[in-house]
Image (tube, helix red, strand yellow):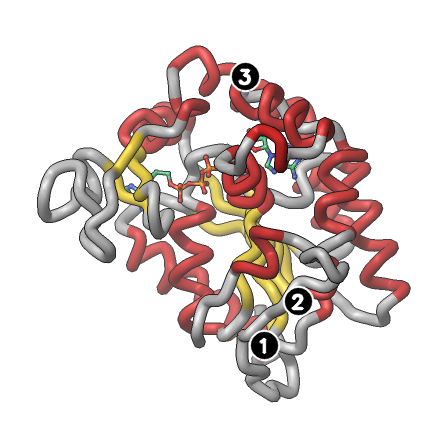
Amino acid sequence: MKNDRLAWLQGPGADGAAKCSNVPEERKNPWRLILLGAPGVGKGTQAEFLRERLFACHLSTGDVFRAAGKRNDCDQSPAMKEAMQYMRRGELVPDATVWEMVRERSHCLLHCNGFILDGFPRTLGQAESLKELMEKEKLSLTAVVNYELPLNEIVRRLSGRRTCEKCKAVFHATERPPKVESVCDHCGGRLFQREDDRPESITVRLEAYERSTAPLIQFYKNLGLLLPIIAQGTPDEIAARTMDKLDRLSAGAA
Ligand code: AP5
């Protein structure tokens, strides 16, 4: 599937409607997934693998904030400028700002190809807002995939992450290095280290995860939607593990 994420990343245009050029896949049961897991566990990496296999759109809230942060100062709303401050420190952006941003892109959630949500919801308040929206639209979640990894491995993944400034492809300095140092394999863009991958921000992000996001595991377990996946091994191995569970779920055997 062509990965047109402009409508998601940029939000509504001047005429109030973001344009999406993703071709509808006409699937009977589109996948509507949430990826849960601590920062750095590999959600973004897995979302890209799953997108190719499931034909659903990869929707990351962190990517929306980072894209907004790249705009000119005067093109950023006060709420977005404030969001950037939270993000740099590694703290969660307030629910009201996050929900406003997701709500104005809700057509991406309603797209007939389905979605893979990465980084949202992150608090019980966000999960309740999403549940309400989906109930109103008579849509249901297929599953909530929860990636699990020991803390030392998470910190190693975050500290070595390198991201392409142009196409946003993600590498790892030692585990998934680019062919040429600091240069993206896909588009030749420069690779950089995210501001919130500095040690002091990593600590704040992991605390925020434990406090606000980990309770979502029980929330979705209670709804019978949780699929725990061990996130150790290569990205291919983890993707195969995830697909196996999803296939069994769709065959009614998970
Ligand atoms: P966000 O962008 O969502 O960041 P995150 O959840 O902290 O997750 P990451 O992107 O850091 O990690 P990931 O799990 O996607 O791992 P990745 O695949 O890159 O959010 C950033 C900030 O935005 C938040 O802190 C907050 O301020 C704000 N925000 C966003 N959404 C919000 C919300 N809903 N509410 C409030 N605030 C919000 O992998 C990491 C590294 O590991 C990479 O280098 C990768 O190459 C490597 N790697 C991946 N898999 C493997 C593997 N199997 N083996 C070895 N290396 C691997």
Location of residue 225 (image quadrant) = bottom right
Please give the residue where the numbered disc 3 appears in the rendered image: 89
Q: Amino acid at mark 1?
A: Ser
Q: Residue furthest right?
A: 136
Q: Is residue 206 left or right of residue 175?
A: right
**Circle 3 residues within 10 Å: few <14, some 14–19, many ≥20:** some
Q: Amino acid at mark 3?
A: Arg
Location of residue 115 (image quadrant) = bottom right
Q: As displayed, is residue 108 above or below residue 203?
A: below
Please give the residue where the numbered disc 2 appears in the rendered image: 142
- Residue 209, visible in the rendered structure: no
Query: Which is more foreground, mark 1 or mark 3?
Result: 3
Q: Quadrant of the N terminus?
A: bottom left
Label 1 vs 3, first from the N-terminus? 3
Q: Amino acid at mark 2?
A: Thr
- Depth check: 179 or 156 in front? 179
Give the residue drawn at x 38%, y 50%. Answer: 45
Mark 3 beta carbon near ligand 1 (under 8 Å): yes
Q: As displayed, is residue 21 above or below residue 208?
A: below
Q: Is residue 224 left or right of residue 63?
A: right
Q: Say what secondary structure mark 3 lies in.
A: helix
- Residue 26, visible in the rendered structure: yes
Answer whether labels 2 and 1 touch (C-beta < 8 Å). yes
Q: CA distance from mark 3 to mark 2?
A: 33 Å
**Circle 1 residues within 10 Å: few <14, some 14–19, many ≥20:** few
Please give the residue where the numbered disc 1 appears in the rendered image: 250
